[in-house]
Amino acid sequence: MDAVTYPDDKVIDFINSNLIPLRVKSDMPLAKEFNITWTPTLITLDQQGKEHYRSVGFLSPAELIPSLLLGMAKVYFDTGVLDQCLGTLEKIVSGHPKSKAAPEAVFLRGVAGYKNTHDPKPLKAAYEKLQADYPGSEWADRAQPYRLL
Amino acid sequence: MGQIAWTNEMKDALTKAAAEKKPILLDFFSPA
């Protein structure tokens, strides 16, 4: 991460603009609190310090930014800020459609859209987009029940 | 070229997160 991803200008700009970056050595007591067993482990926390998303292992600059967006979206989803959640997911779906985070973003966009409107159409739309664009992904499988809506 | 504005203390990160209304990115790394 230090050699390739963190020196990347887009990564620097994204993190400094959107997140509060906190870096802790894996031999510090905080690592035990978070059950860290491998590095790098990147965790997205809300403003109270509660965990909402984590990834383990190296991520390239092209994968890190959508992964961080997904973590932010999960913070907004879990804390009920659904408009901000949907806006963040849209950045992944539109701006990083080939990233590994994209299929999960499509799925979560459907769920957040449903929770925001109580209309099942976003769930069906998520199923259809996953079948069309990410048919081999686990998220296409997880959306299977929504085909019946 | 700039660099990531890391903080090393959870307390500082929580204070900044509340002030700037942003989530926290917590990166655990192995000492070199």
Image (cartoon, coloured by chain):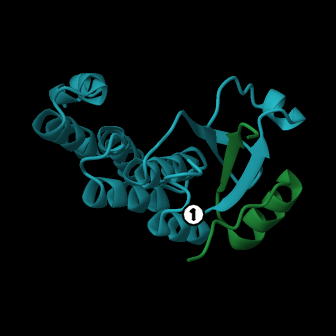
Chain colours: A cyan, B green
Could you tell me residue A70's position as x and y percent? 46, 48
Q: What quarter of the picture does the C terminus of chain A occupy? A: top left
Q: Which residue is drawn at 14% across and 33% down?
A: A131
The image quarter containing residue A53 is top right
Could you tell me residue A97's position as x and y percent? 25, 51
Label 1: which secondary element: helix
Q: Nearer the viewer, residue A143 or A114?
A: A143
Chain letter belonging to callout 1: A
Image vertical order of residue B29 relative to residue A14, above or below: above
A39 lies left or right of B12: left
Q: Nearer the viewer, residue A59 or A106?
A: A59
The image quarter containing residue A106 is top left
Q: Which residue is drawn at 85% across and 61% down?
A: B12
Q: Which residue is drawn at 70% across and 40% down?
A: B29
Q: Name the residue under label 1.
A: A15
Could you tell me residue B30's position as x and y percent? 72, 36
Image vertical order of residue B29 relative to residue A73, above or below: above
Could you tell me residue A129's position as x and y percent? 17, 42
A90 lies left or right of A40: left
Residue type, label 1:
Ile
